[in-house]
Amino acid sequence: MAIQLYALDGCPYCEKASDALDEAGVAYETEWVDALHSDRDEVKRISGQRGVPVLIDEERGVTMSESANIVEYVERSLA
């Protein structure tokens, strides 16, 4: 899948990003991460930090974090 969202279950910021993708009708795959920051090695490898949400748009070569940035990107580039 071209769009991946790294998220933590119950995270309100992850939910904002997910809702934006859903509202825009974007197909994406959610990669659920561990609650412990120290166990988020894959997120660190991909984005350079361990926080979520992280959006990966392989088609456009975009990797970003922070829910506000993700929502803005989805609205401007994917909707």
Image (cartoon, rainbow, N blue to C red):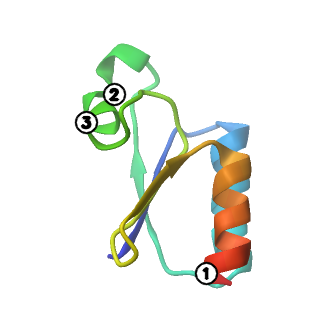
**Pick the front one: 56 or 11:** 56
Going by the numbered disc 3, the residue's amino acid type is: Arg
Q: Where residue 31 is drawn, which disc sits there?
A: none
Residue 53 screen position, x and y as percent: 55, 43
Going by the numbered disc 2, the residue's amino acid type is: Arg
Mark 1 surroundings: few (<14), some (14-19) or many (≥20) residues within 10 A: some
The earlier-in-sequence mark between 2 and 3 is 2
- Classify the position of the N terminus by image quarter: bottom left
In this view, 72 is above or below 32: below
- State the residue position of label 3: 45
- State the residue position of label 2: 40
Residue at (42%, 27%) from the top-left corner? 50
Query: From this viewpoint, is residue 30 visible?
Result: yes
In this view, 60 is above or below 55: below
Q: Secondary structure at mark 1?
A: helix
Query: From this viewpoint, is residue 19 visible?
Result: no
- Classify the position of the C terminus by image quarter: bottom right
In this view, 22 is above or below 12: below
Residue contact between numbered discs 2 and 1, judged by CB atoms under 8 Å = no
The earlier-in-sequence mark between 2 and 1 is 2
